[in-house]
Amino acid sequence: MNSVLNLNAADAPGASAVPMQLVCPAGSLPALKAAVDHGADCVYLGLRDATNARNFAGLNFDEAAIAGGVRYAHERGTRVFMALNTYPQASNPQPWRTALDKAADLGVDAVILADPGLMQYAAARYPALRLHLSVQGSATNYEAINFYRQHFGVVRAVLPRVLSLAQVEQVIGKTLVEIEVFGFGSLCVMVEGRCALSSYVTGESPNTHGVCSPPKAVRWQETPRGLESRLNGVLIDRYAAGENAGYPTLCKGRFDVGDDENYYAIEEPTSLNTLELLPQLLKMGVRAIKIEGRQRSPAYVAQVTQVWREAIDACTGNPHRYAPKAAWMASLDQVAEGQQHTLGAYHRPWK
Amino acid sequence: MKLSLGPLQYYWPHASVMRFYEAIAATPVDIVYLGETVCSRRHELRLSDWLEIAARLIDAGKEVVLSTQVLIESGSEVSVLYKIAANGLCAVEANDMGAVHVVAGKLPWVAGPHLNLYNLPSLQWMATLGASRWVMPLEMKRDDLAVIQAGRPAGLQTEVFAYGRMPLAYSARCFTARNRNLPKDDCRFSCIDHPDGLLLNTREKEGFLVLNGTQTQSARVYNLVDALDDMHALGVDVVRLSPQSQHMGEVIDVFHAARTHALAPHEALAQLQPLMPAAGCNGYWHGLPGLVQHTSAGEPATA
C-alpha cells in the first residue's frame, strides 16, 4: 500500500473531534482579507488565467498577491487553498504544471484539483502537499472518491451540488476522504465537470477555459419587446419593463418548451442556501462548508462569511437548539441571485 | 475505421428497443454500446434484457459493450454498477470514475466520453488501468486530438463521437418532469413520450437544446461525416453514431458508404440532411462553439 494511504487518527470516518470548517471565496486580495477578518477557517483562490474555474477579467491573483495573501492568512490562523480545477488542454498543458509548482512554492495549505494527470504530477513531486478533489472532478459516489484517494492520496472531496442530504450521508459513511459541501452561493444545476452547455454556445466552458457563459459573449440590447440578453447571439432572456435583469447564465434563461412558453425550463435565477441544514450536515460528519463567490465583491465576502461564522459557531455549540436567525437569512437573501434562495438538490422535491 | 453505435440516450418502450436492435444487427456497424446511461428510473429494460440483446448482436458478429450510467448518486445506482461489471459476457464502457474503479483490472473496458480525459497524462493513467479504448470528450477540438494521437499510449484505441444530438450536460433534476410540473420521484416516466427528446426553443423559436430527462442535449445534430478522412489520417480507430428514433439504418449506411469512399464527403453530407431530426453542427471539431456549422472553403454549403 502506498504511504499516502496510511490512516491516522484524524482520518477515522466521522471523526467529530475536527470541527466543521468554513471555506470562503477570495477573488482578490481585499476579498481574502475580508474573509480572514470575518471568521473564515480557510480561503480559496486561483491564478489569473484558465487554470481555475473562475477565469474572469479583473479577478484572481498573481504570485505576489498570493504570497501576501498566504502571509496575511497564516498570521491569523487561516488556511489557504489554491484552485487549479480546470482541465489541462492537450496542446498546452504546461500552465497547469507551472501553476502547481507555484502553489507548492508559495506555501498554500492545499490544492484543489480536477484533472487526474495533474494529481499524479502533484502526488509524485510534492508528496506533502494536500490534495483536494474539486467539484469539477464530478465525483458523486464513494467509489469515485475512494478511487482518487487510492491513486493520488486525495484527502478531501468537494461534492457536486446534485446530491440529496441522504446521498451525502451515504457517501460519508463509505469513505475516509473528508467531505466538503456547498453551503451558499450561485447554484449550479448541472453536475459540475460534466456540463458543456457553455462551450456549445460560446466555445468556452468550465472544463476547458474556466468559464461558464463568459462575459465577452454577453450582449445586452434594448428592443421594442424589452431588454434582451444574448450569449453569442442566442437569446437567453427578455425582460419586461421594470423587471430585474440577471446575468445571462445560459441554464437560467427563459425558454419555450412545447406549449409552455417563456419559463425557466432548467432553473430560476436563485442561490443555494443551506443554513437550515447545518445541524444535519454537522451530524453526518461533513467536514467543511464551501461558500461560492470568487467573482463577488469583498463586501459580499465579508457579509456572507460573518453570517456563516456565527451560524456554524451557534450550531457546533448547541446543535439541538440551533435555528437559523431571521437576520441571517435576510442578510444572505440580500446578496443572493434574484434575491431568493433554495435548498437545491439537498431537498428531494427540488428534483 | 470501425463504426460504433453509442448507447441509446432516450427512453423507448420495450418493444421499440427490441425492434431497433433487431434492425441494427443487420447493419454494417461493428460495435454496439448497450444499456441505460441517463436515468435509473427508466426500467423498460432490465439488465437481463440488455444481455439478451447483447447475445443476439454478438451472434450477428458485433462487438458489444455495456455502458454504465453517467451520473451515479445513490447506493442502488452503485449496486447496478457492480452488476454491470459482473455481467460475464461483454466489455464495459465506464462513464464515471467510480465505474473505472470497479472495472479496472477485472474485465476489458472502454473509457467513456464523460471521464474528462483532455490530455496525455490522464490518458496514460487510463491505459495503465487497463483501458482498451477511450472516447474523446465532445468539446475537444481536432487539433488537440492530433496532439494526443501523436503521443497516445500503445494499444489504446481512440473513438470519436461523430453523429447525433450531443449529450451536453447531466443533472440530478429531471427537466422533462419539470416541464409537466411533476417531481422527479413521480415523473410518470414522461421521457417515454419523447423518442428524440423534448425540444427547447429560444423565445425567437430557434431550436436550442433538447431536454431528455436529467440529460440536456444539443438541439442540433453533431455530424462529422465530412471529417472521416481527416480522422482516418489522425489514426482514429472508431467513429461513434448516436441512436435516433427514425432513419438510423440509413444514417449508418451513409457513414458506411463514406468510410469506404463509395460516397464523397459532400455527397454523404447531403444524403444525411433529410435523415437528421434537426439542422447539423460541427463546431467543436473545428475549435469553434459547438452549435456552429463550419463549412470548408470550396465545399458546397450545407445546413
Image: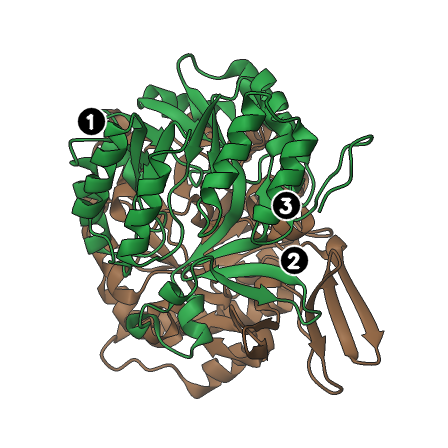
- At which x and y percent is residue B93? 33, 35
Residue at 41%, 39% in the rendered image: B6
Q: Which residue is mark 3?
A: B273
Q: Chain of mark 1?
A: B
Q: Nearer the viewer, residue A252 or A84?
A: A252
Which SS class for mark 1? Answer: loop
Evaluate whether residue B53 shows in this view.
Answer: yes
Q: Which residue is mark 2?
A: A30
Residue at 66%, 26% in the rendered image: B264
- Looking at the picture, does residue B13 appear above or below residue A44? below
Few, some or many residues within 10 Å of mark 3 (<14, 14–19, 20+): some
Q: Earlier in the sequence, mark 3 or mark 1?
A: 1
Evaluate whether residue A15 shows in this view.
Answer: no
Distance of label 3 from label 1 (alpha carbons): 43 Å
Can marks 1 and 2 be said to lie on one chain? no
Residue type, numbered disc 3? Gln
Chain coloured brown in the rendered structure: A
Q: Chain of mark 2?
A: A
Residue type, numbered disc 1? Lys
- Looking at the picture, does residue B161 appear above or below residue B9? above
Residue type, numbered disc 2? Pro
**Residues at discs 2 and 3 in contact (Cβ within 8 Å):** no
Which mark is in front, 1 or 2?
1
Residue at 19%, 41% in the rendered image: B52
Few, some or many residues within 10 Å of mark 2 (<14, 14–19, 20+): some
The quarter of the picture where residue A345 lies is: bottom left
Can marks 3 and 1 be said to lie on one chain? yes
Q: Which residue is mark 1?
A: B106
